[in-house]
Image (cartoon, helix red, strand yellow):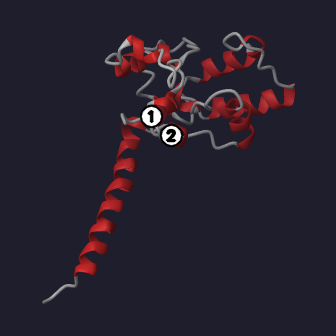
């Protein structure tokens, strides 16, 4: 049987694309956190920084953060009461210890059940995953801070945080 070269190339392309897609799906077990799906939450949280997936912090953290928006890491990010309630509800419903449990459990290792950490970058799992990054790299112009996930994880806004 003589298979045309074009058919072989097309087949290899399909196999390659499938591997990429399946690789992303498989990465979902360790490196995937569902991005913010609520438009209002994405707009409000993403207006100043990447809208971090709700599954990266426990519900208590989001509740606390949303009550302290007048001093949100040094900025006033206050929202009107209705907007704040809706954003809070979304974040709490999808937090690492509620609806986002299957994704957030990996970041919650080492966190007390009654804790409400405010910085993802201070979670033990996050620190362990990034301990090989030299201190000076965090200060590079393109990075700027540990909270700038897309600087190193090109698909962070899509929820993928694997090493690039």
From the image, tell me which residue sits under label 1: 153
- Residue in view at x 46 percent, y 14 percent: 111
The answer to which quarter of the image holds residue 21 is bottom left
Q: Residue placed at 79% from the left, 27% from the top?
A: 84
Query: As drawn, is 39 to the left or to the right of 79?
Result: left
Q: Is residue 151 left or right of residue 39?
A: left
* Residue 142, x across and y down, in percent: 51, 25
Q: Quadrant of the N terminus?
A: bottom left
Which of the 4 image quarters holds residue 132? top left
| Mark 1 neighbour density, 10 Å: few (under 14) some (14–19) many (20 or more) | some
Looking at the image, the residue that sits furthest to the bottom is: 1
Mark 2 or mark 1: whose residue is earlier in sequence: 1
Specify whether 149 is left or right of 9.
Answer: right
Q: Measured from the top left, where is residue 7 in percent x and y?
A: 27, 80
Answer few, some or many: residues within 10 Å of disc 2's Cα (few below 14, many 20 plus, some between 14 and 19): some
Name the secondary structure under disc 2.
loop
> What residue would you read off at disc 2?
159
Out of 154 and 123, give the one closest to the viewer.
154
Q: Is residue 10 above or below residue 89?
A: below
How far across and down, in percent of the image, does residue 136 sit? 41, 12
Identify the image quadrant of the C terminus: top left
Which type of secondary structure does the marked residue at label 1 adopt?
A: loop
**Residue 102, position as x, y percentages in the image:** 46, 36
């Amino acid at each position: 049987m003589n298979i045309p070269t074009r058919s072989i190339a097309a087949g290899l392309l399909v196999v390659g694309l499938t591997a990429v897609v399946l690789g992303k799906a498989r990465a979902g077990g360790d490196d995937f956190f569902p991005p913010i799906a609520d438009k209002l939450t994405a707009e409000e949280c993403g207006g100043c920084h990447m809208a971090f997936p709700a599954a990266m912090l426990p519900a208590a953290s989001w509740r606390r953060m949303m009550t302290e928006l007048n001093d949100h890491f040094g900025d006033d990010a206050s929202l009107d009461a209705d907007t704040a309630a809706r954003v809070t509800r979304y974040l709490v419903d999808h937090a690492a210890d509620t609806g986002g449990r299957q994704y957030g459990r990996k970041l919650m290792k080492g966190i007390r059940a009654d804790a409400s950490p405010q910085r993802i970058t201070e979670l033990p799992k996050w620190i362990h995953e990034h301990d090989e990054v030299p201190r000076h790299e965090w200060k590079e112009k393109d990075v700027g801070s540990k909270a700038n996930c897309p600087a190193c994880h090109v698909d962070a806004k899509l929820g993928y945080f694997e090493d690039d």
